[in-house]
């Protein structure tokens, strides 16, 4: 131990000086989530038959299905309760639910964490209530 | 020289999770350590009794953020045993691949944390950069970086496509290259060796006596690994070495972990090669027949044990989790004896602790009368409100 030796990693460290940073400059640079990423849940009202299998299997009681008319169902997802496990997607036999790649879900306003998919809108576009 | 008792925690910069050590010192030397757990108790076991088996998978997965696959696999295996189902071959391989990917990410994480604890932040930065490779592949395979949600009762939820399998193999190659470098660093870097050699000694006898498990035990010459001794998933179909080391100190624990990484790469390669096409789930009824079972799983930190009792309904009657850290608490108290206070962070970090996994019900014992009482939720709440009121904080 009398000899002063440079650290074993010194080469690696010096070579990093001329390399680009390993980090991504988020949020200036967006990155796409992979295809089967479990992000925000999307609901297709026209496919739902109201069996409520999704409600029964949801571990955090984040999803509710309400009947709003003859064969018409509305879905409410509480984004603050949801743990994005996508069990509801697996449970639904009618493929009325889908995971999306959306992951930027933080909100300052708690009301916005409640997502309602109305039955009447054909495309299932959300409306905040 | 007089003795001094120093409290470390529940909140302390050296600790990542709340736990409280009271360390008795004589000068700089640690002569006695008392550990108090329970600051992170979340009532997961109780919550499991109130929910169905399917819901429980996701709750138990959240016992630990780092070894989430360990807990969910251990639980589903136990339930499958009660239900008497055999899962398809392909599902077994997928569980094995995810399990090993998880071990890789956990061990790389540990290597970084260990570097950080001894002030070697360069190592921390580089291992965590490389850990991103495995995190990315986990995200692609399972849909998330942590809490993979790949398991379901009777198999796995997602198949791995051919392209993804190829991608896994290329990632494994890249990681292997990096790990070889870290093995060099661990065996040649003098700072690292000087700091870790002969620190936190736990002799083989003491390790057996205190019941050390996982890499902590294996670094003290305990040749045990659930993957080999009681194979689950596809571990009986792959060959691998159980890394045992006789350094008995923190350095040994480092070596065991980096060498285990190399074994993990080989297990993944064999699994990808042996995998055949086929179904990934079998149907299991929602109501699990009455019975009980005991499941074992080799998590990155040691053996994880789940006990499940079923009463024939959709919900389990009892779920008991013994996370690996609980078994390694006794050994760590032994290891700390006669070392300097400054060695405490790295010695504790060397068991790769996960205290929130370990925390269980609070049992209060009155030292004078030696009577114990268990507080339920309501009385605990009342007690806390009273406690704050006395200090002038109202609710
Ligand atoms: S499981 Fe599917 S079809 Fe049934 S209620 Fe839920 S969304 Fe509708
Ligand atoms: S993703 Fe999971 S937590 Fe969220 S609504 Fe679906 S089942 Fe419930």
Image: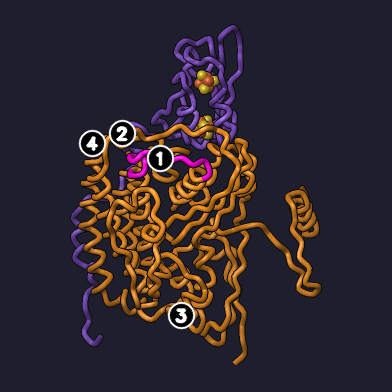
Chain colours: A purple, B orange
Return the chain for callout 2.
Answer: B
Return the chain for callout 4.
Answer: B
Classify mark 2: helix, strand or loop: loop
Q: Compare marks 4 and 1 and give the one earlier in the sequence.
A: 1
Q: Was residue B4 drawn as part of the magenta stretch in this picture?
A: no
Residue B83 appears left or right of A31: right
Residue that appears at 33% across and 67% down:
B256
| Residue B278: mark | 2
Q: Compare marks 2 and 1 and give the one earlier in the sequence.
A: 1
Question: Magenta segment range?
Answer: B82-93
| Residue A77 appears in the rendering | yes
Task: From the image, tell me which residue sits under label 4.
Answer: B163
Residue B163 in the image, given as x and y percentages of width and height: 23, 36
Marks 2 and 1: CB-CB under 8 Å? no
| Residue B44 appears in the rendering | no
Residue B129 in the image, given as x and y percentages of width and height: 30, 54
Residue B114 appears left or right of B384: left
Report the front residue among A11 and A71.
A71
């Amino acid at each position: 131990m009398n000899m002063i030796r440079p650290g074993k990693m010194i080469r690696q460290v010096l070579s990093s000086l001329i390399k680009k940073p390993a980090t991504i400059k988020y949020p200036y640079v967006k990155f796409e989530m992979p295809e089967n990423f479990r992000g925000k849940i999307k609901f297709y009202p026209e496919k739902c038959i109201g069996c409520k299998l999704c409600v029964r299997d949801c571990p955090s009681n984040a999803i509710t299905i309400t009947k709003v008319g003859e064969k018409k169902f509305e879905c409410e997802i509480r984004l603050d309760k949801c743990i994005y496990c996508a069990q509801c997607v697996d449970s639904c036999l009618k493929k009325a639910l889908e995971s999306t790649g959306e992951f930027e879900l933080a909100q300052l306003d708690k009301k916005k964490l409640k997502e309602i998919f109305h039955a009447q809108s054909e495309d299932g576009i959300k409306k905040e209530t | 020289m007089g003795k001094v008792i120093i409290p470390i925690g529940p909140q302390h910069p050296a600790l990542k999770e709340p736990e409280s050590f009271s360390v008795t010192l004589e000068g700089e030397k640690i002569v006695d350590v008392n550990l108090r757990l329970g600051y992170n108790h979340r009532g997961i076991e109780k919550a499991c009794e109130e929910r169905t088996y399917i819901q429980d998978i996701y709750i138990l997965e959240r016992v630990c953020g780092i070894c989430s696959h360990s807990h969910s696999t251990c639980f589903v295996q136990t339930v499958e045993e009660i239900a008497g189902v055999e899962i398809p071959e392909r599902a077994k391989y997928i569980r094995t691949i995810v399990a090993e990917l998880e071990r890789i990410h956990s061990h790389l994480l540990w290597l970084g944390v260990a570097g950080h604890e001894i002030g070697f932040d360069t190592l921390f930065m580089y291992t965590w950069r490389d850990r991103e490779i495995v995190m990315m592949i986990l995200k692609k395979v399972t849909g998330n970086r942590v809490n993979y949600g790949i398991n379901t009762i009777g198999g796995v939820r997602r198949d791995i496509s051919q392209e993804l399998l190829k991608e896994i193999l290329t990632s494994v190659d890249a990681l292997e290259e990096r790990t070889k470098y870290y093995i060099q660093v661990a065996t040649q870097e003098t700072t690292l060796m000087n700091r870790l050699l002969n620190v936190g000694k736990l002799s083989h006898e003491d390790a057996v006596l205190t019941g050390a498990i996982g890499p902590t035990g294996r670094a003290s010459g305990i040749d045990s690994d659930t993957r080999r001794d009681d194979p689950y998933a596809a571990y009986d179909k792959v060959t691998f070495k159980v890394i045992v080391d006789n350094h008995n100190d923190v350095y040994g624990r480092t070596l065991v972990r980096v060498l285990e990484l190399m074994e993990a790469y080989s297990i993944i390669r064999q699994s990808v090669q042996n995998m055949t096409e086929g179904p990934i789930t079998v149907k299991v009824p929602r109501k699990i027949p009455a019975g009980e079972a005991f499941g074992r799983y080799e998590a990155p930190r040691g053996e994880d044990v789940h006990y499940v009792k079923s009463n024939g309904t959709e919900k389990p009657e009892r779920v008991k989790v013994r996370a690996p850290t609980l078994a390694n608490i006794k050994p760590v108290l032994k290891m700390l004896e006669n070392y300097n206070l400054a060695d405490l962070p790295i010695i504790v970090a060397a068991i790769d602790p996960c205290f929130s996994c370990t925390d269980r019900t609070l049992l209060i014992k009155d030292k004078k009368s030696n009577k114990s009482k268990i507080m339920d939720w309501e009385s605990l709440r009342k007690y806390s409100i009273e406690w704050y009121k006395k200090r002038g904080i109202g609710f």
